[in-house]
Image (spheres, rainbow, N blue to C red):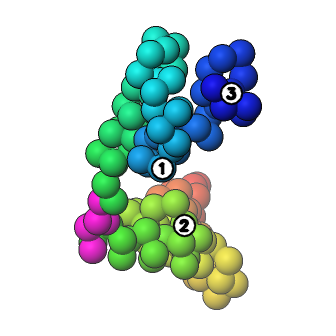
Amino acid sequence: MNDSMSAGHCSEEQIIALLLNDADPEIRAHVDSCPTCTKALAEYREVRRRVELVREEEVPPLLEARIMRLARHGRRDDRGAGLPGVVHALLTNPLFMVVAVVAMLIVLYLLVGSELVNVP
């Protein structure tokens, strides 16, 4: 039996060599007669089979474009992002604030001020 076998069983490297058909005939003979090493080889074969089933998926072009756009702009999502941006721009614009205050004063005068002028 090979010196690199621990406790009479194949090492991980030896099992992988068997899996790749690159092992010594002595190792192959041992695995054929040892239920523990046969089970280990079967487990590695199952892992290999599952790995081979994994395939690379193509990202749909529209999804890729959206991801790249979101990454460039640093936003989580661009749906509905226009309105908050406009509101922020208006509220930080001094001219808009003056116009808004004047408009509110005119509306307030029209609703309440005309009654105050007619007070006897």
Q: Is 86 contained in the magenta span?
A: no
Name the residue tied to disc 3.
5
Between circles 1 and 2, the one closer to the viewer is: 1
How far apart in space, not on screen, are marks 1 and 2 (Cα)?
52 Å
Q: In the picture shown, does residue 33 fall above or below 108? A: above
Which residue corresponds to the image point at 48% horizontal and 70% vertical from the top-left? 70
Characterize the magenta stretch by its predominant secondary structure. Answer: loop
Residue drawn at 68 percent across, 27 percent down: 5
Circles 2 and 3: CB atoms closer than 8 Å: no
Residue at image location 49% in from the left, 14% down from the top? 34
Looking at the image, tell me whether mark 2 or mark 3 is earlier in sequence order.
3
- In which image quadrant can residue 49 be found? top left
Q: Is residue 1 visible?
A: yes
The spot of residue 67 in percent (x, y) is 43, 68
**41 or 55, which is in the foreground?**
41
**Disc 1: which residue:** 22
The residue that disc 2 covers is 75
What type is the residue that disc 2 sits on? Arg
